[in-house]
Image (cartoon, rainbow, N blue to C red):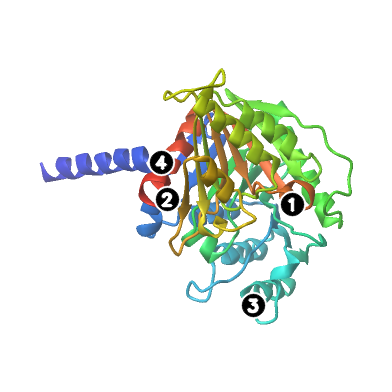
Amino acid sequence: MKKTLSVALLLLAIFLNHKTSYARSYENNRIEVYISTQKNLTANDFILEKEIVRFINNATSSLDIAVQELRSGNINDTNPIKEALLNAALRGVKVRVIVESSYLKTGSDNLNTFAEFLNTENIEIVADKNPKIFHDKFIVRDKDQTSAALLTGSTNFTDTGTRRNYNHIMVINFTGERKDYFEILELYQNEFNELWDGIFGNLEPAQEVKTYRIGNTRLTVLFSPDNDPDDYLLKTILSANESLDVMMFTFGSNSPLLAGVINRFNAVKYVDRRPTDQPKVKVRVGMEKQQARFWSAYGTLKKLGTPVKLEKTSAKLHHKIGIIDNKKTIIGSYNWTLAANEENDENIIVIGNPDIASYFSEAFEELWNDVLVD
């Protein structure tokens, strides 16, 4: 009886964990999404760190990494992501890394990690040559192998990025028979190769923006500044008919996307130029505490009466997410600023999948109700 009860309790725990965990897979595990929330961070369940390490550990031949920051940090003077990369190199995986140069200051953990990688066999590491900001966050794994995959999102590979701040990652697995969507991996590989060859910023002709399908999921890939993402993102925001939820680390008052948010909020207050108490488009914007400054969109949105809140704890709301009508989700490294569109190196994916959008909405609701303040 005790054994039967133990098994039942174990199955119940697994079921509850599956229902409440902020880690889900879609399209027969071809797409995986991971979101760090207050609940799992408080419980020291560092899901992003664990999944990035798992992603690295599954590499068999190569890892091409473009990330703004990768450092040892203060977690027992180490970083599991860094250690996973060192172990990958030790077992013969070819590792190439590009990081932002401005963080490589004398005595910094960033510089110490950089130097350690420079002296490790099978690891090549370079600093960016973008005079503005190198802000990409992605890994291309094992191109042309059965373990080929892409990891991207909002987090840097640091202790604060994965153990304290609110971030997300998405993994796309490119296994089985080759499909049209395998071109996504090619796009990211080409972007990495361009950066590795020293081409940063807006020095290459714009690439054609394409949308790919994985099962019932549509994925549109954009790189900044090559694709001038604001044009596409503005159209995406303006397509909102019911709701627009934004979680944004940096939202500049000079971003054209602010006009899109205001347009949708005006649709809340007015229909056919007449005031209404029944909003058509529900707009909410959550931002990091540093947004309460003159250069931010925060003041404009607040003045207009837009529901807007700030994250004011020691953690950072580091997401770069827009959720449209619980149908589409904008994710990636891209803050909503003019510099991100015109100067920085960034990567974005727009996801058309209501289930994935609802998943991000769950994380938004937790932040909006339990973490963010007016």
Badge 2 vs badge 3, beta-carbon distance below 8 Å: no
> Circle 1 is placed at which residue position?
339
Query: Which numbered tag is attached to residue 365?
Result: 4
**Front of the two marks 2 and 3:** 2
Q: Residues within 10 Å of mark 1 (few under 14, many from 20)?
A: some
> Circle 2 is placed at which residue position?
374
Q: Residues within 10 Å of mark 4 (few under 14, many from 20)?
A: few
Mark 1 or mark 3: name the one nearer the start of the chain: 3
- Amino acid at the residue labelled 4: Glu
Q: Relative to 186, is 348 on the left or the right?
A: left
Mark 2 or mark 3: name the one nearer the start of the chain: 3
Alpha carbon of mark 2 to alpha carbon of mark 4: how far?
Answer: 15 Å
In what element is the residue under mark 1? helix
Q: Which image quadrant is residue 12 in?
A: top left
- Amino acid at the residue labelled 3: Ser
Q: Which image quadrant is residue 20 in?
A: top left
Mark 1 or mark 2: name the one nearer the start of the chain: 1
Alpha carbon of mark 2 to alpha carbon of mark 3: how far?
Answer: 35 Å
**Front of the two marks 2 and 4:** 2
- Residue at the spot 51% in from the left edge and 32% down from the top edge: 357
Q: Which x, y percent locates residue 41?
A: 40, 57
Q: Which x, y percent locates residue 58?
A: 58, 51
Q: Residues within 10 Å of mark 3 (few under 14, many from 20)?
A: some
> Circle 3 is placed at which residue position?
108
